[in-house]
Amino acid sequence: MINNAGFGLASRFDELHDLKIFEQIIRVNFLGSVYCTHYALPYLKESNGRLVGICSLRGKFPSATADGYGASKHAMAEFFESLRIELADSGVSVTIIYPNWVSTGISKRAIRPDGNPTGEISIHEKNAMSVETCSQIIIEAVTKRKREVIMTLEGKAGLWLQLIAPKIFDQIIRKKTA
């Protein structure tokens, strides 16, 4: 079972006038995976199945915007990390995928503070990984029952930088996501 539902929010937290948009992103991006997993779990246990969470690097890293997307992906990552431990003796493998930008059109559909989609592909997504490449990496990881996959060298380097030089890491994140 691959949990891959989600949408983005193109807003700073202090620009939101109605927190219903924030609640919506948590419901779709996080609780969508929780509900789907809940109902699929008996079948996954019965078949020694594979459970996959497509989290995004925002599940590992902060952003310059507290827009709810990152919070939803952090929650999703923790949920699947905990499930991996809980299900260790069940035969169900849990794989968490952390792609960076993938060319899916998510930025065009991201919601602005007024509740309307941006209608524009962000500069980050314009040079993003193709859906085909991303899918191939996911299939390989799931087939091998990998624990997690951080898809980019930039993401792997970011994990180390965050540990050894957190202030520099914060400065880089602010520049990249501003």
Image: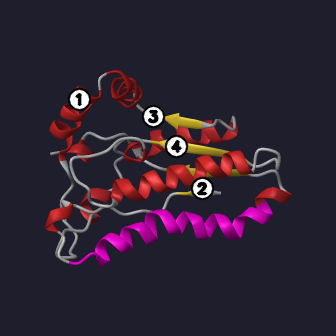
Comes first in the chain, label 4 or label 1 = 4
Q: In which quarter of the image is the C terminus?
A: top left
Please name the amino acid that badge 4 sits on: Ile
The answer to whether 98 appears left or right of 173 in the picture is right
Kindly identify which numbered label has been placed on residue 97.
4
Comes first in the chain, label 1 or label 2 = 2
Assign the magenta stretch its main secondary structure. helix
Residue holding disc 3: 151
Q: What stretch is highlighted in magenta?
A: 18-43
- Percent across and percent down for residue 79 are 57, 55
Q: Residue at x 69, y 70 (%)?
A: 39
Element under disc 1: helix
Q: Residue at x 47, y 34 (%)?
A: 150
Please name the amino acid that badge 3 sits on: Met
Q: Are the two marked residues, 1 and 3, in contact with CB atoms closer than 8 angstroms?
A: no
Decide: is 146 above or below 40. Answer: above
Q: Which residue is drawn at 43% across and 41% down?
A: 99
Q: Are the two marked residues, 4 and 3, in contact with CB atoms closer than 8 angstroms?
A: yes
Q: Residue at x 18, y 59 (%)?
A: 12
Task: Decide: few, some or many residues near mark 2? Use Cα within 10 Å; few <14, some 14-19, many ≥20.
Answer: some
The answer to whether 91 appears left or right of 19 in the picture is right
Residue holding disc 1: 167
Please name the amino acid that badge 2 sits on: Ile
Element under disc 3: loop
Residue holding disc 2: 2
**Residue 95 or residue 67, whichever sits in front:** 67
Marks 1 and 2, how far apart in space?
A: 35 Å
Marks 2 and 3, how far apart in space?
A: 16 Å
Marks 4 and 3, how far apart in space?
A: 8 Å
> Residue lying furthest top in this view?
164
**Residue 82 or residue 146, whichever sits in front:** 82
Q: Quadrant of the N terminus?
A: bottom right
